[in-house]
Image (cartoon, grey):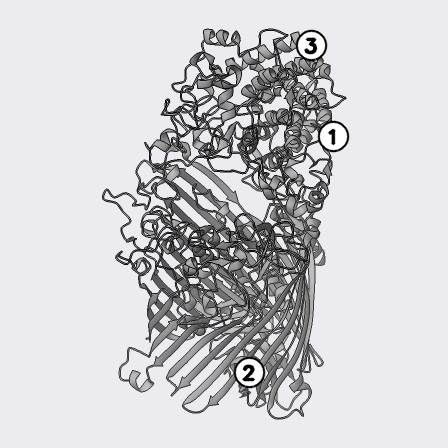
């Protein structure tokens, strides 16, 4: 009896221990994985990049005047800042959270699973994200970021962050160079929606980041044009290497942020600066049909009234009206009114004054980058060629500069055609149009006539609508109004800021965004104070990279 | 779970092996209370003249040895003493009659333990079911207002099926759940409110953060007619016994059981008429427009005066209707010595004051009890509830705010145009953003939930010996809710997505059990009781949600009617399990001293690492001690006026697990970007989370004077909750948007008392008064991780939100402010002449009341007329009048009527001299009629905080006429009949200028702090109700 009781008690205890575990070990969510596979973690890391770029581009696109706002004295038209850290701050969030946390896990799991290709690509994306973010925000947390249990974060200075980007690139390359372990193009291709697991292309992307990183320091004495050019040479070899984000455009979240379904352009219309680069004003001084860039009708939108002149179209340029910065435009509410006709069209396509049909993802509507299913470029061959052109020009190697400059224009024209191939009612730029343009007065034909202005303005056209951070960095390197000694005019000829926001405390243009309001103003207020981010004109503080 | 079954059954079997070796004549029996047949525990059983004595066990069972002709005396506090002369029998069952409701009440505390209220070390307030029933509230929680000292009850809206929150003593958690648990017949039931973020949003302008929709709190499924008693446990010891969720207190409900005797049938019915009460006032002078210029399509009212010739419509009164409801309840009960049963069926139908809103509920319950042997008792309880709530929009974008800003010179009733499309003020049914016409909203947008719920439990009680009892309760609480939210393609909410349909199915299954053994043994003068118990609660929760857009047919409500490309679905799970083991020792010395100590160990799955299971992670323990002295038993020489005096003290700690599962590890959600995959949750887990710890202290006294005609139950408490588990928005550099962290301490201290008195007690009139007083002071002693401030984003409404800061309290609100100079003067913009706003959320309001008083008067006249009323007083506490701000911003507030009077805002100009000793006074003249920005940019949320809002409300008043026996006797069918007239929320006297200061801008599923309580935006006040009720007994 006694013995059986002891046995029974022991049995009960054993049962208790095992059942307890079974009973309590249910703290993993059955509807969401705790450690997803690399192939399922990777797609959103790249897919989010179009959102990262576009959401902030709404605002930086105002600074660089890709577009101007229909509201009078709109903050970004006036180079006012994102007061209190609201508005322009997507890059901050995506760098740390959407990309950041996922990249940490890809690297951690990838090393365990010896999938060096995933690891290298993930580190490359971190380098890209940090480069993009610091070019927007300047000082940011890095060394303490993602540290468990940490709630306050130290901000690193930008010179440190630039070095971090460089180091990340080199670390990424060392992984991408490995072919041992479980490196396998097909396996990585399942998660890699950009390059389908092609490590060579990833390496070109990494060299592209290095080219941007080193080239941004062009105002500094340590600037090394040869290194920049060599990074460019190792980066994209043609448009086939472009880093593009695809959109399946079936619903709100998977559609191109610039597509008509997302309606980001109701309040933003093509700017005077952008239109005049293409309609002949800037390069020819007239807007006659022969002076217009063939890309004009393929990148920008024409209005219903093509012949009535007004401030939105002071000369006959085929109907390509524009919005003047800060002056705004009261949009008529009644279709058919004169105000309506004379308003610049939205970028979705010709004659679309208002959103053609929100949420309609199926129809083929819009042009160039402004279609719901258009790809969103993150880095392109032609951008690299312009970097090389500028670097070579600064070095004095005008021959290389001219070749790269022309390569850039040519490749961009091809790129416009590719993107318009599926667009409804948008014709392709013919070979004749292209060769005529490349041979025209708008494009410099000799070493001697090539100027920095030519390179930078053509680069601006090529970067229009997608490469906001780079365009802005370029403008910031030239302090918006720096003079081209050859032309004795501003490098960014035609660019003007008519009114400055009172927050700027003077006629000072914007140089940075404030850190995001959602977390930093609560948690890292001390750091914000230290770097001056609470000052009213913080957004006008010049960044480290563009200083000598 | 299996383990517990295994553990229990052998234990259970062991007990049969005990055998009693009686050597002399033993009398046994069961002692029950005469009013409800519940067994009485702790009844003193003595043989007079001898030293022999014992007490009854939890089943009311006693056993005593006595000789023939000796007299056994049964005495119990609060009950009349009975004697029995021993004859030849060996069993003798006794029914004791209650003499005093207050003192003698045996109350049910943790896990069905019945205790004499006299022995308790803490305050426990009991409310009789009849009191709840007479208010005829569909959601019985609303009937508790004013009846519990220290309870804050807030109905989300005055609409049918609205959720209602209850907070006892004060919010303990900055971010966790602050509501008490609900326990029905010994087992915890679910009282959650559906969390909007758990399902796919209907795309469009609707806010998902628990603001624009309300879902009932599930305790409202209980039929008030089934409640026998409701006991509120707030004290440390009681709550410590309940483990994790007990930290906020417990509402213990005992349902009505059958009574022995022939079948007793009763039917009661009631009809209620409701009328909307206290609508915000709007101006009818100025027309639509801005800056003094008319604009017929604007929804701002800064235009010219409306011409006298224009027709003005009473749109508001045309919109509301008289709400009607009816309730029918049938109950049958009866039984024999072996078993009893009680069956009830209830039907409620309510049509709200807003067209197309309503609430409908069917309740069925069967309670049975069987005595299998004198030692073995089984009770069962089965209930099925079906309810449906038809809702209207609320808050921003909701019907009320749209109605209040509808042009008075336009007939809102015409919500359709000639072709049957939505008639919009802008003329274009699909053009531009324009709040839905309220008629359109309630007629064309469909929003309802249907809930089916089953609860049941089986309880076995076994008394192997006179001093030992084993009991086991097993229960299940299962429900499924189906929700539908259909937004018409022409509705403003969904016009740009071509209509939207969001549907969800919520399945909840809670299985729980309690296994308890109790032993009671008297050693000398010490009367010892040991209770040991195992408990478990296992919950499975799943929501399947689907949405679609772009309807093919604009009116057909089905997901099959949406464009397949827009259809998306998502599943959300929340499964957890808990187990607990506790032991409680209590002793009573010489009837005047009670001491008690307990220890509880909890095991929670929510604390387990998702990958690496460690038992130690899941385990946490805590304890309580307490004692009381019955002064009147200790000192016999007290003045005769004092019948009873007791002093008590109690201290306990309580651990608590996180309020949500899956927060120890990181999770990934399905990406909706191109290519799919998984993307990190916005909320990051934290592997280092520890249980939160409450330390609770309570002391108090209970006094009875003047033949029990005056009584006082006073309690002082000081509770601290440390290492709070909160989920704040964190620096993104952490890699997350939100993260779970431990830290911070919140204190609640205060005092409460219940004063009971009978000023008049004569043959024809008895007048009873109860005063319930509660005062709580909440303080955030430290913030987690030194966090400068914390808020739940659900509460971020307009430009105001909750705020938790160190040294502040959980009730505070923060908003933007105007810039001021060092002297406190407003700094005025030189260009606009208006103050300058600073986007810096600082504390602007404190919603904590100074105190609350519930005053209940009850008159019993001529034995068959009863009149009672419940007045609810509140002093202090700020309220944000968001509706008024909304109206003010749009020129609809009557406060904007002086707009033609020019004025200079008092302040100093922002000219660089503002912070010098000689600032330039503002001299910019503004005539708001031409400067409508005076009412928008020139004002901030802080201006609409109403400070120190007091109220007196008539919560309910009830007059009952019981048909006299002489009248009833004339026939044989009817045994009793009663007529009742009740008025609910008949009036409110308050210094609050808006609708109802008891408002909630969120719903009760918003976690943490006080949620949207005291934030009034787009809500209607609880309507006034008149009820006629009739009760028949057969």
- Label 1 chain ID: A
Marks 1 and 3, how far apart in space?
A: 28 Å
Packing grade of label 2 (10 A; few <14, some 14-19, many >=20) is many
Disc 3 on helix, strand or loop?
loop
Q: Position of residue B562 (x, y in %)?
A: 36, 36
Q: Left of A131 or right of it: where is B140?
A: left
- The residue labelled by disc 1 is A159
Marks 1 and 2, how far apart in space?
A: 82 Å
Residue for point 40% across, 59% down? B159
Front-most of residues B438 and A321? A321
Marks 2 and 3, how far apart in space?
A: 106 Å
Whether discs 2 and 3 lie on one chain: the answer is no
Residue for point 37% across, 22% down? A306
- The residue labelled by disc 2 is B78
Q: Left of A156 or right of it: where is B147?
A: left
Task: Give the foreground label among 2 and 3.
Answer: 3
Whether discs 1 and 3 lie on one chain: the answer is yes
Can you tell which quarter of the image residue A124 is in?
Answer: top right
Task: Give the foreground label among 1 and 3.
Answer: 3
């Amino acid at each position: 009896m006694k013995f059986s009781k002891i046995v029974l008690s022991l049995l009960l205890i054993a049962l208790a221990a095992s059942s307890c575990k079974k009973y309590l070990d249910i703290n993993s969510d059955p509807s969401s994985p705790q450690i997803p596979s690399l192939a399922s973690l990777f797609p959103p890391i790249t897919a989010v990049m179009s959102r990262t770029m576009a959401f902030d581009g709404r605002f930086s696109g105002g600074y660089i005047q890709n577009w101007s706002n229909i509201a009078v004295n709109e903050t970004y038209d006036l180079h006012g800042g994102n007061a209190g850290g609201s508005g322009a701050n997507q890059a901050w969030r995506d760098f740390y959270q959407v990309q950041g946390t996922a990249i940490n896990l890809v690297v951690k799991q990838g090393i365990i699973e010896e999938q060096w290709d995933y690891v290298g690509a993930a580190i490359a994306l971190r380098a890209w994200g940090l480069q993009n973010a610091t070019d927007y925000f300047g000082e940011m947390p890095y060394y303490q970021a993602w540290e468990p249990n940490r709630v306050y974060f130290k901000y690193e200075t930008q010179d440190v962050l630039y070095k971090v980007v460089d180091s990340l690139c080199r670390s990424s390359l060392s992984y991408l160079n490995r072919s041992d372990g479980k490196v396998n193009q097909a396996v990585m291709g399942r998660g890699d929606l950009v390059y389908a697991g092609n490590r060579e292309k990833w390496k070109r992307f990494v060299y592209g980041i290095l080219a941007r990183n080193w080239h941004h320091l062009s105002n500094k004495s340590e600037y090394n044009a040869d290194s920049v050019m060599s990074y460019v040479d190792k980066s994209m070899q043609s448009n086939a290497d472009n880093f593009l984000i695809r959109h399946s455009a079936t619903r709100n979240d998977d559609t191109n942020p610039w597509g008509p379904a997302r309606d980001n352009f109701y309040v933003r219309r093509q700017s005077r600066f952008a239109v005049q680069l293409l309609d002949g004003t800037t390069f020819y001084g007239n807007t006659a049909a022969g002076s217009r860039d063939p890309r004009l009708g393929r990148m920008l939108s024409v209005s219903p009234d093509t012949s009535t002149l007004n401030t939105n179209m002071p000369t006959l340029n085929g109907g390509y009206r524009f919005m003047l910065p800060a002056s705004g435009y009261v949009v008529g509410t009644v279709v058919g009114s004169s105000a309506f006709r004379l308003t610049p069209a939205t970028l979705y396509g010709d004659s679309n004054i208002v959103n053609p049909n929100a949420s309609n993802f199926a129809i083929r509507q819009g042009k160039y980058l402004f279609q719901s299913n258009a790809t969103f470029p993150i880095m392109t061959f032609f951008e690299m060629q312009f970097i090389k052109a500028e670097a070579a020009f600064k070095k004095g190697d005008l021959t290389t500069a001219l070749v790269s400059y022309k390569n850039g224009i040519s490749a961009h024209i091809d790129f416009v055609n590719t993107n318009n191939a599926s667009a409804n009612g948008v014709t392709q730029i013919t070979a004749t149009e292209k060769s005529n343009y490349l041979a025209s007065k708008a494009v410099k034909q000799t070493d001697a006539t090539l100027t920095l202005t030519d390179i930078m303005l053509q680069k601006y056209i090529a970067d229009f609508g997608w490469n906001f951070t780079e365009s802005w960095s370029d403008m910031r390197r030239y302090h918006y109004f720096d003079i081209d000694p050859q032309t004795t005019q501003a490098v960014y000829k035609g660019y003007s800021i008519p009114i400055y926001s009172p927050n700027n405390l003077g006629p000072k243009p914007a140089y940075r965004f404030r850190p995001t309001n959602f977390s930093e103003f609560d948690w890292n207020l001390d750091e914000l104070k230290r770097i001056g981010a609470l000052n009213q004109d913080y957004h006008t503080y010049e960044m480290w990279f563009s200083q000598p | 779970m299996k383990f517990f079954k295994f553990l229990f059954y052998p234990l259970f079997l062991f007990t049969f092996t005990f055998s009693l070796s009686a050597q002399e004549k033993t009398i046994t029996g069961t002692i029950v209370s005469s009013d409800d047949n519940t067994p009485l525990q702790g009844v003193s059983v003595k043989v007079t003249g001898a030293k022999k004595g014992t007490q009854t066990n939890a089943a009311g069972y006693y056993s005593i040895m006595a000789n023939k002709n000796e007299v056994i005396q049964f005495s119990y506090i609060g009950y009349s003493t009975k004697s029995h002369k021993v004859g030849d029998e060996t069993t003798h069952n006794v029914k004791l009659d209650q003499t005093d409701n207050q003192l003698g009440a045996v109350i049910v505390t943790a896990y069905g333990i019945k205790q004499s209220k006299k022995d308790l070390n803490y305050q426990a307030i009991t409310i009789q079911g009849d009191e709840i029933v007479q208010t005829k509230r569909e959601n019985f929680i609303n009937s508790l207002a004013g009846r519990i000292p220290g309870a804050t009850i807030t109905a989300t809206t005055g609409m049918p099926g609205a959720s209602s929150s209850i907070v006892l003593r004060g919010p303990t958690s900055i971010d966790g759940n602050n509501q008490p648990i609900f326990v029905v017949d010994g087992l915890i039931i679910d009282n959650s409110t559906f969390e909007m973020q758990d399902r796919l949003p209907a795309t469009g302008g609707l806010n998902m953060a628990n603001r624009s929709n309300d879902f009932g709190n599930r305790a409202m499924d209980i039929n008030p007619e089934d409640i026998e008693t409701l006991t509120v446990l707030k004290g440390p010891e009681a709550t410590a016994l309940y483990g994790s969720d007990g930290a906020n207190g417990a509402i213990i409900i005992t349902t009505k059981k059958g009574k022995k005797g022939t079948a007793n049938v009763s039917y009661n019915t009631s009809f209620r008429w409701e009328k909307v009460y206290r609508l915000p006032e709007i101006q009818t002078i100025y027309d639509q427009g801005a800056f003094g210029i008319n604009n017929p399509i604007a929804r701002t009212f800064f235009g010219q005066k409306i011409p006298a010739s224009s027709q003005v419509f009473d749109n508001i009164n045309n919109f509301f209707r008289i709400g009607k409801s009816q309730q029918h309840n049938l109950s049958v009960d009866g039984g024999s010595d072996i078993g009893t049963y009680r069956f009830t069926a209830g039907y409620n139908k309510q049509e709200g004051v807003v067209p197309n809103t309503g609430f409908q509920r069917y309740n069925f319950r069967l309670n049975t009890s069987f005595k299998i042997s004198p030692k073995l008792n089984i009770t069962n309880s089965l209930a099925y509830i079906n309810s449906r709530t038809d809702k209207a929009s609320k808050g921003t974008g909701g019907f009320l705010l749209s109605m209040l800003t509808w042009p008075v010179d336009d007939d809102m009733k015409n919500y359709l145009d000639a072709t049957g499309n939505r008639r919009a003020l802008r003329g274009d049914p699909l053009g531009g953003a324009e709040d839905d016409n309220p008629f359109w909203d309630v007629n064309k947008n469909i929003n309802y939930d249907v809930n089916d719920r089953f609860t049941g439990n089986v309880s076995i009680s076994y008394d192997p010996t006179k001093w030992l009892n084993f009991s086991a309760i097993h229960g299940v609480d299962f429900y499924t809710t189906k929700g539908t939210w259909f937004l018409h393609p022409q509705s403003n909410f969904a016009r740009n997505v071509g209509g939207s349909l969001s549907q969800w199915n919520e399945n909840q299954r809670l299985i729980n059990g309690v296994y308890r053994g109790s032993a009671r043994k008297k050693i000398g003068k010490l009367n010892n009781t040991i209770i040991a118990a195992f408990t478990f609660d296992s919950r499975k929760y799943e929501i399947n949600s689907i949405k679609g857009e772009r309807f093919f047919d604009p009116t057909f409500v089905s997901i099959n009617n949406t464009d397949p490309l827009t259809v998306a679905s998502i599943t959300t799970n929340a499964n957890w399990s808990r187990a607990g083991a506790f032991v409680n020792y209590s002793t009573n010395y010489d009837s005047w001293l009670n001491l008690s100590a307990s220890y509880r160990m909890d095991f929670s799955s929510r604390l387990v690492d998702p990958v690496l299971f460690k038992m130690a992670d899941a385990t946490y323990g805590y304890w309580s001690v307490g004692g009381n002295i019955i002064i009147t038993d200790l000192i016999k020489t007290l003045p005769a006026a004092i019948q009873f005096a007791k002093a008590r003290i109690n201290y306990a700690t309580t651990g608590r697990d996180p309020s949500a599962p899956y927060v120890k590890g990181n999770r990934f959600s399905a990406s909706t970007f191109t290519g799919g995959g998984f993307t990190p949750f916005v909320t990051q887990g934290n592997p280092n989370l520890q249980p939160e710890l409450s330390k609770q202290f309570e002391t108090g006294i209970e006094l009875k004077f003047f033949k029990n005609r005056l009584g006082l139950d006073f309690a002082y408490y000081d509770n601290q909750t440390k290492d709070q588990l909160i989920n704040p928005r964190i620096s993104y550099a952490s890699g997350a948007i939100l993260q779970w962290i431990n830290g911070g301490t919140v204190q609640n201290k205060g005092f409460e008392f219940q004063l009971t008195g009978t000023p008049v007690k004569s043959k024809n009139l008895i007048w009873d008064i109860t005063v319930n007083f509660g005062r709580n002071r909440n303080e955030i002693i430290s913030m987690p991780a030194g966090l400068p401030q914390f808020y739940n984003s659900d509460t971020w409404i307009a430009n105001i939100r909750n705020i938790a800061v160190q040294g502040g309290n959980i009730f505070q609100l923060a908003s933007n402010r105007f810039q001021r100079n060092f002297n406190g003067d407003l700094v005025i913009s030189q260009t606009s002449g208006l103050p300058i706003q600073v986007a810096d959320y600082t504390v602007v309001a404190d919603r904590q009341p100074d105190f609350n008083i519930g005053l209940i008067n009850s008159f019993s006249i001529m034995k068959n007329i009863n009149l009672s009323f419940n007045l609810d007083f509140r002093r202090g506490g700020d309220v944000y009048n968001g509706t008024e701000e909304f109206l003010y911003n749009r020129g609809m507030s009557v406060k904007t009527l002086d707009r033609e009077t020019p004025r200079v805002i008092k302040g100093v100009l922002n000219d660089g001299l503002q912070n010098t000793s000689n600032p330039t006074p503002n001299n910019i003249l503004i005539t708001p009629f031409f400067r409508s920005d005076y009412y928008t940019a020139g004002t901030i949320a802080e201006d609409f905080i109403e400070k120190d809002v007091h109220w007196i409300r008539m919560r309910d008043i009830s007059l009952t006429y019981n048909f006299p026996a002489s009248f009833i006797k004339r026939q044989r069918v009817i045994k009793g009949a009663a007529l009742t007239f009740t008025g609910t929320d008949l009036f409110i006297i308050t210094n609050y200028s808006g609708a109802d200061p008891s408002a909630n801008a969120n719903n009760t599923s918003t976690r943490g702090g006080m949620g949207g309580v005291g934030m009034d935006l787009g809500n209607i006040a609880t309507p006034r109700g008149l009820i006629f009720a009739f009760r028949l007994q057969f």
